[in-house]
Amino acid sequence: MVAILISPFYFFRKKSVPKAETEIYYSKMPWWRGAIYFIGGALLFVFILSYLVLKEEIGFNLGMLGWLIIFSILFLLYAKAKKIKLKKKEGTFGFYLVEEFTRDNSLLGTQEVRKKKGIVRKTVEIILIALVLSVAVSWFVRSIVFNAGERAMSELTEISTDKSAQHSEINGNIYRNTKYHFRIKFPENWTIQQGDGPHIVQKAVFGNSTISIIAQEFDFGGESFSSIKDIGSAKEFIDSTIEGTKKKFSDVKVIDYGETKIDNEPAYWVEYSAKSQVLDFDLEATQLIYFLAKGNILYSISAGTASNEYAKIKPKFYQVVSTFVIENY
């Protein structure tokens, strides 16, 4: 009985822990390897300060992903740099990696359990650093290209669209424009008319349906588009387009968007619905627009109709877009 009563005190008694001795060990590093952590951190810090001071002038936005990548790299550099010391040892100055060893007397007094990262953990660290750097480089290059393209577009001089009849040729349902170097075949029995918008060169009308060809010419100062991709990615371009549409129409909903090729040229497309009000009538239309660029011209092929008629007319829209050809470039 006494043994049972005192047994908890025995099993839960405070056990003695062998005293562990901690030793500091300095392993010499090559100068370049030690310096790279400090120089890398300093350059990254200078980059952050420069960005904060000059971001308005350079027109470059890091965004949330950019800041996440930068602080991840900064953290990795700091985690390593804090273990590196510049000191004089054995008569020479150099960079030394500071490592801690714990000598455990319970393991025959000779086994050393290192607190530093093992081989597996080091490998993981190298992979993570390489991954973060590769993502950072690809993101940085992509951001510079897009921001430069976006900024260049905002600084371009837009030239008024020339709708002169001397540049237009109509042969049956085939329309050709010699000024903007394209031709297109409209559906049979549709009425071909001169465009009524500022950049609509020509359009074809049938009931509630309209197909419009838009040409926007820019003064690049000697430069030119190689393709629509010079302006940005499909998502970035379409997002910008839809933002502009929302300023004019209500309840704008993107149905789908993507990339394709027209006349073997890269093209972006977007399909969306929108509502508008004319007098006391509420109208809902669905629009399909294709965008491509060549030389100094941004082309748009816009096809739209009442939403309740869209499914029936959509195959004709596809057929017309497939006939668009850029000529004499």
Image (cartoon, helix red, strand yellow):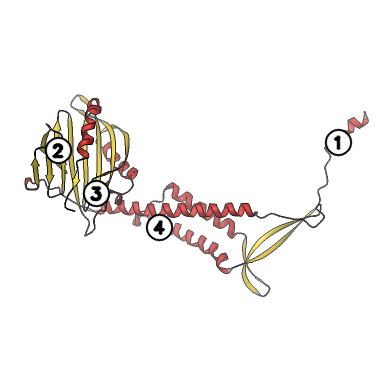
Marks 3 and 4: CB-CB under 8 Å? no
How far apart, in angstroms, are the residues tagged by discs 4 and 2?
49 Å
Q: Which one is closest to the eye, mark 3 or mark 1?
A: 3
* First in residue order: circle 2 vs circle 1: 1
Please report the residue visible at 17 percent of the width from the left and 41 percent of the height from the top.
213
Residue bearing the label numbered 2: 203
Q: Specify whether residue 220 is in view.
A: yes
Q: What element carries label 3?
A: strand
Which label lies toward us, 2 or 1? 2
Going by the picture, which residue comes out furthest to the right?
A: 2
Q: Earlier in the sequence, mark 2 or mark 3?
A: 2
| Dot 2 crowding, Cα within 10 Å, few <14, some 14–19, many 20+ | many
**3D distance between C-alphas at marks 2 and 1:** 95 Å
Crowding near pointer 1: few (<14 within 10 Å), some, many (20+)?
A: few
- Among the two numbered marks 1 and 4 on one chain, the one whose residue lies closer to the N terminus: 1
Q: Is residue 198 visible?
A: no
Q: Judge depth for marks 4 and 2 and give the one in front.
A: 2
Image spot of residue 28 (x, y percent): 64, 67
Tell me where residue 248 appears, x and y as whole percent.
24, 36
* Residue 9 tag number: 1
**Residue 53's disc number:** 4
Gap between marks 1 and 4 measured at Cα: 67 Å
- Does dot 4 land on a helix, a strand or a loop? helix
**Tag 1: amino acid:** Phe
Residue placed most toward the observer, 54 or 196: 196
Marking on residue 219: none
Measure how far apart labels 3 and 1 are at the Cα level.
85 Å
